[in-house]
Amino acid sequence: MYKERAERRIHIQPLPLRTVPAASSPGLQVCREEMSDVGRDNAPRSRPVMSHVGRSATPSNNNNDEENPVPDFQYFGLTPRSPPSLQGFLEVWGVEVHARPDDVNKAQHHTQFYDCNNLVVRRGQPFQITVTISRPYKAQTDKLWVELLIGRYPSAVKGTYIPIYLQDELVKGRWGAKVISAQGNTLGLSVLSPADCIVGRFRMYVAIMTSHGIRRTSRDKATDIYFIFNPWCKEDAVYLSDDDQRQEYVMNDVGCIYYGTSTDVTSRSWIYGQFERNVLNACIHVLDRARMPLQSRGCPINVCRVASAMINSKDDAGVLVGCWDGKYIDGVAPTAWNSSVEILLLYYKNRQPVCFGQCWVFAAVLNTVLRCLGLPTRVVTNFSSAHDNDANLHTDIILDQDGKKMLELTKDSIWNYHCWNECWMLRADLPPRYGGWQVVDATPQETSEGMYRCGPASVIAVKEGQVCFPYDAPFVYAEVNSDVVYWTQQNDGSLVKGEVKTDEIGTLILTKQVGSDMRMNITDLYKYPEGSREERSSLETAVHFGVVKPEAPKDLPKDVSVKVQVDENIMVGSNFTLALEFNNHSNESRSAEVQIYGYVMFYTGVPKVQVTDENIEVEMEPNEVQQAQVVIKSKDYEDKLVEQLTLQFLITATVPETDQRLVIEKKVTLQIPKLRISVEGEVAYGREVSVVVQFTNPLTKTLEHLVLRVDGLDFTRPDLMLFSHLPENETLRANFSVVLRRHGRWKIIGSLDCPALRQVGGELELHVQ
Amino acid sequence: MYKERAERRIHIQPLPLRTVPAASSPGLQVCREEMSDVGRDNAPRSRPVMSHVGRSATPSNNNNDEENPVPDFQYFGLTPRSPPSLQGFLEVWGVEVHARPDDVNKAQHHTQFYDCNNLVVRRGQPFQITVTISRPYKAQTDKLWVELLIGRYPSAVKGTYIPIYLQDELVKGRWGAKVISAQGNTLGLSVLSPADCIVGRFRMYVAIMTSHGIRRTSRDKATDIYFIFNPWCKEDAVYLSDDDQRQEYVMNDVGCIYYGTSTDVTSRSWIYGQFERNVLNACIHVLDRARMPLQSRGCPINVCRVASAMINSKDDAGVLVGCWDGKYIDGVAPTAWNSSVEILLLYYKNRQPVCFGQCWVFAAVLNTVLRCLGLPTRVVTNFSSAHDNDANLHTDIILDQDGKKMLELTKDSIWNYHCWNECWMLRADLPPRYGGWQVVDATPQETSEGMYRCGPASVIAVKEGQVCFPYDAPFVYAEVNSDVVYWTQQNDGSLVKGEVKTDEIGTLILTKQVGSDMRMNITDLYKYPEGSREERSSLETAVHFGVVKPEAPKDLPKDVSVKVQVDENIMVGSNFTLALEFNNHSNESRSAEVQIYGYVMFYTGVPKVQVTDENIEVEMEPNEVQQAQVVIKSKDYEDKLVEQLTLQFLITATVPETDQRLVIEKKVTLQIPKLRISVEGEVAYGREVSVVVQFTNPLTKTLEHLVLRVDGLDFTRPDLMLFSHLPENETLRANFSVVLRRHGRWKIIGSLDCPALRQVGGELELHVQ
């Protein structure tokens, strides 16, 4: 580098063959800027921004935090030497936007819970402001209007500069204002926005026409108005007709997320907290960081696609860094978070990606962002989710000749579960029937394109196999519809295809019920019943659009079957039993050579380490059922567990008489004792109670470096409590007092995290009178 | 930062609230890695790569340059203490892939021009290899097979590990090999690949089965084989039936790119050079830098989408940095390049984005990459291209009350021309009729999503308005179909809509003719004839899919019209005349107040500076035609020009009698004297001739810092010649000798670049016997 720079000084001629310098070199910032969008946001603020010169007349208007000054007095023609006489013209003494939660606007707009001093209104619905003027208003001669501006270089054709003139009647779908009261020096106005206006924070001015020019109110941040999406408004693309659903998908700020396995579903509560102080600002900041032009922020399709890209940090220095390695060095383990609020506010404050997230954290944060902006949104969990597989309908598992999984060759994995979001909207870009719920997925996928954004993909299109429509429908289709194909590698490197299991992926799709913490099975929104005519037709459609379906080999012998059972609710640290049942359906004797391999597994389906290797032989008379048991000992797995405590058993059985080969996979999720949260004192509004959190170490070793995190809405609490160690069998006890400041349902959610034991959680629900 | 690190040492507990540190801080590399894909490639090689642990069993196989070692002898079971006796088993003494251009394979595969020592074959078509073995081959007992591997952790189900067994007959669509000759110790094999196999560089081994294990040939880079797409193969998705078209769109390595304005089209020749030494490696490197998984490199849809993202440096440290500022500090001006070869090899060598490109450079480099990989591709130019406008059908021009353009408010621009690529392929992901030419655009667009990749979008779908199909069809539709809307801003900030011009965008779409340097008008591939029933129906379809069409205001008076003419071929530095013709179509007298504004303009339609401001008044009798002239003087614009030398005139006329307002825009591209290239000596194969390049300074000032660039194929030449200055009216003369080593058509392309005068080019075409 030094040498090149020296050359520049000697030659007069430019050195035209220069390329962009390495990231470590100083200078030449312009090129580096252009190279990397990430660079700009992480870099110190002094770095020059890439020139827009030659490309556009003004820099793009993509930041809600930036503004140009607007003149208080805008002369027609040249500015005169002395101030002109404005006698007789109106003067504006004050503007009141009625932003208090108990005032007229917020309740009507369902925005009373936003902890925000400014007015928050939903678009497509009128709101009231009061202007105090210097004398009574004369409708015939005074010309007064309201101006809304957003961003830099606002422009009327882009919807970023909006002059709103007084008119006799408001017209749906257009900006307008009308006088609803004129008493003395005050003028009450009703202002209407169209149902497709930009979502964000607008600056407001009141302007008066004089003979010399336009006189405006000064910039006053107290009159800034936030416009958000309006699911209550029929004309809005996000209109949702059912009020219970609106209460759940827009207004509810605490929810449940499902995880575990389809046979052993667990739920955890989550604080979405979309109304908390500064969360709305943080959500707008997320769109600003994506440099999303303000003019396109009125379209829910664009907003949720950009948000899905920005929640993960890939490409764009977004909110959360994904990490699955089980170590989480220098960050918070994904299992330790309870609340989107903490994550969003950290990102908003530090302007840097927060460490770390996994699928449910990405989905929960996206849920907060979209609900906060007024989009009806929910978190859904797909159990046994095919992943990272390039929109093809097969997940390939390669076994060696002993029936053991060949880890280096088995690249596809089936996640125990995967969380994404659904967002409710019209899809004006697609044929009419594909509106409704749309899949949006913020978890980065390692596919051919490296999908660091996904969706919106129409759920109906996925169900019907119409995967030719944007965005990313083939990927969602494969996540819920893939087959599992078992291959056996031969000595010469060739693969022999074995069983193809068609019912192991997308076994169950859940979301929280409207109005309760129960789960709702929405599998039928994504899939027709297994074996139905519609299912076949949907598959044919998807295959027609390039999705690849594996073919099952013909004529595989099938006269022996195996079932595997394990106990329910196995507590971590205990021994348990795999119960195998072999069934000979033939009229001849059969035997089976059975291999049982057990692995500690990440929830992504990736095996970490093998913990079991057992062989048994079974002899069966014609039509006989035989049973066998394998005991899995705590000491074999306890030290090797990763968070989410999942073990996977792979049972392969070979029937020598027929060369039949059976493969069964069984996942077991171990239980951890819950964090016990209780409250002492009378539960009533305004009262102080004491919250007690307790946890007993279930492992046969001392836990170290424990972090207790307690989250909830509307109460003051310690953010974190740190404990250096917790010996075997001992109980940790923490307490603190809180004042109850929320009516009705009230939740406290706790998590305890330490390197040896993750995913310890607990919650408490109270009803405050 | 220091403080935080110090805290870490004191506390035992982890500090869970850490976020990703600023880019300048050392340490914590893992988080930074995850944050930015760009980081990885620009950073010193020592930086740790983000862990895949927990996410996948093996790292992803996304780099054609990486490999795992393969054992020369792979034992079945445990490795014995002493080497086993292999007497009686075959030994492989040598493998010959017949890679010489004059040998059997390359001519059959149309790859004889690749300047590459390795074998390059097209998929879906057999090629021959010869194996020399230790004794004659016994078909009954010897088990010999060929193995092809690509990347790390190759796997048979992903198509990255391919064992090819000998069989009696080759089966189309499957990997296979058959013996075509067995004479003494040599074995001739014909090897067939399927027409959808991965495109890239495979390692080849020959394996022999012994009783103790598999014996393999050693790693030998000379037997590496490149597989590329095959437009000659009916089964390949990129099959193109016409041989002339294949010669043009796959085999031609020199082409023409059109630019200028639709009324004044200019062409420049361009060296695509897809067969040049190391270009194929550079193209594969481009896909590697995108970290495109090898398994998805067989799909032309994916390959051209990834390539479109990687040609520009946005997001992903791709090939070329876009810059439009006219200064091009520390880089080559986009107008100075003549060849994709120089750009791709610079990127391949330095592994850093090359500065700078604009649309035709992006398109030309993408053309090279795709032709090199075997995809039929062409560069097309759309004249008057709507850009950066979020897939809406309007480009808004805002005028003040004097008819002058309000630059701060006019954000949309119409590019004089825009270049993109078309790529020929089946679209298995769409309904059947949308195959054929697909638009792929590598120029980064400043739209709502920040599109740094675009396409493939079906040209037929664009023509029919079926913009609901991926990828990015609405944007292409808007580029060729937008309307221009003129607005006038009033004193109170409101806008009044004036004329809507429906025939100013996408006026002409050109590409080079097959087999000649003539241009071919392909506008009808994108659009039905203006005013036809099909055009209306296509528009209705597009509007149905969310494209927004502006409405023209009704009842605008239209009884006066204006035409503007300028001289053709105006040389830079000369005065010229705007001839205006006013036509009064009414039966009454009319007058017109006419304002004429002239701007120096970038080719992106962005005005740089105003150079003309004239007012004239015209009086017209009923049905009279009046003429007027405005002279534009060289001294007014000469010092203000930017490259491509375009002036834009905006003529607004107001007819006071009817309040009619007319707006006409006229673009004028000035001519520069060409670089004169001539040859001295006898033009015959193998002869040395002297090439002379001359240029006379046309400006009335001294040119400084001149860089002369000469490109062409198959001859040695100086890369660059630098000149410190060239006084007014003087002639620069450079010469060098070359040996003619190419039969047939032969082109030399030169460009001369200096800050005061860009886009000086010239070329010479010879036919060598």
Image (spheres, coloured by chain):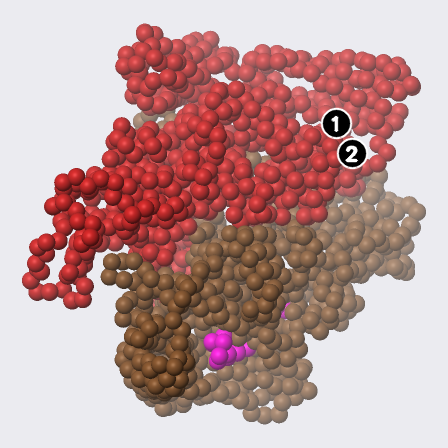
Chain colours: A red, B brown
Q: Amino acid at mark 2?
A: Gly
- Magenta stretch in the rendered image: B259-275
Secondary structure at numbered mark 2 = strand
Q: How far across and how far down the image is residue B208, in percent? A: 81, 46
Q: Amino acid at mark 1?
A: Val
**Mark 1 vs mark 2: same chain?**
yes
Q: Camera-side residue: A464 or B447?
A: A464
Secondary structure at numbered mark 1 = strand
The part of the image, by quadrant, that contains residue A718 is top left
Secondary structure character of the magenta stretch overall: strand
Q: Considering the image in quadrants, where does the N terminus of chain B appear?
A: top left
Q: Confirm whether the magenta stretch covers residue B78.
A: no
| Inter-mark Cα distance, 1 to 2 | 9 Å
Label 2 near label 1: C-beta < 8 Å?
yes
Q: Earlier in the sequence, mark 1 or mark 2?
A: 2
Residue at which label 1 appears: A663
Q: How far across and how far down the image is residue A267, in percent? A: 51, 21
Q: How far across and how far down the image is residue A655, in percent? A: 84, 24
Q: Is residue B311 left or right of residue B409?
A: right
Residue at which label 2 appears: A498
Q: Camera-side residue: B471 or B644?
A: B471
Q: Is residue B287 left or right of residue A319?
A: right
Q: Residue at x 56, y 92 (%)?
A: B680
Location of residue B631 with respect to A666 vertically, above or below: below
Q: Is residue B419 left or right of residue B491?
A: right
